[in-house]
Amino acid sequence: MINVITKVEGFILNTTNYGESSLVINILTKEYGIIGLMAKGAKSIKNKLHALTMKFTYGFFYIYYKENKLSILSDVDIIEPFKNIHQDLTKISYLTYICDLTNQVYRESNEKDIYDLFINTVYKLNEGLNPIVLANILETKYLNYLGVGINLDSCLRCGSTKNIVTIIDGGLLCRDCYYNEPIKDLKMIKLLRMYELIDIRSINNINISKNLIDDINEFLNDYYDRYTGLYLKSKKFLDKIKDSMME
């Protein structure tokens, strides 16, 4: 019989209706990874859980924890409401994509440090930093968890770290190994390397040209399509609104 309440830090990635009045919510937690919670009666506006179990809620969840089964939600203390995100449709769209991506990457890798990468990105999105760049930084970091990371340290063919001229699928090419591949802007290569290494918490402003942002976003879109096996409808929606954002 379950009788002990466990406190976990987490973020609601998505919710599903259950019966007439309840919800099943999937949360990414610091302690247990992704877990499912039954929120009894949460669809009713009179229920105390109604306002606490909406998508994108970030807080401390008090639960009756059952390993590998649906746990039962008792209460939630909000840590940060992320008001700036909830007031902006573009930010909401990017957060939806980041949640979907994180959900799939975590289920593929089960690496717990994904939690901090995700939460730190959400904070920066709420602070108003460029959502395209933030999404691309997270995408770049997630590639390693998916087992298809890009070699951004040396030439893919000879291992040289000098005279790098372009990037192709999987890594860099130096001048000696380059044959007839399209030349990429070296600034793009440097930025991708920075995306892979930077601590998201340290980002205070983003000053990157539209052309570079477009080039990196296009490169990562193609790379994900080719090598990750992930298909996210929320990403396709972002591609439709991106041009209007960049004007």
Image: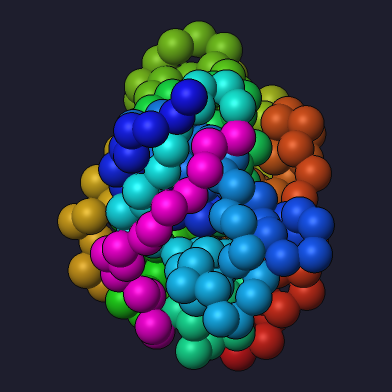
Can you give x and y, in whole percent of width and height, for residue 28 in the image? 47, 43
What's the residue at 40%, 70% (across, down)? 125
Residue 13 visible in the shown view: yes
Taking 98 as reference, is 32 above or below it? above
Q: Is residue 229 above or below residue 211?
A: above
- In the displayed structure, 54 sits above or below 34; it is below
Give the magenta range.
70-84
Residue 105 visible from this viewpoint: no
Nearer to the camera, 108 or 75:
75
Q: Residue at x 49, y 67 (%)?
A: 49
What's the residue at 75%, 37% (across, down)?
A: 230
Residue 12 left/right relative to 113: right
Image coordinates of residue 189 in percent, x first then y, are 46, 44
Q: Is residue 75 magenta?
A: yes
The colour scheme applied to this rendered structure is rainbow
Task: Where is residue 162? Give x, y as percent.
Answer: 36, 25
What residue is drawn where x is 76% and y is 54%? 18
How many marks the image carries: the answer is 0
In the displayed structure, does residue 129 sit left or right of residue 169? Answer: left
Q: Quadrant of residue 103?
A: top right
On the rendered image, what quadrant is the C terminus found in?
Answer: bottom right
Residue 245 vs residue 146, the one in the foreground: 146
In the displayed structure, does residue 152 sit left or right of residue 98? left
- Percent of width and height locating residue 8: 33, 42
Side of 132 where 194 appears, left or right: left
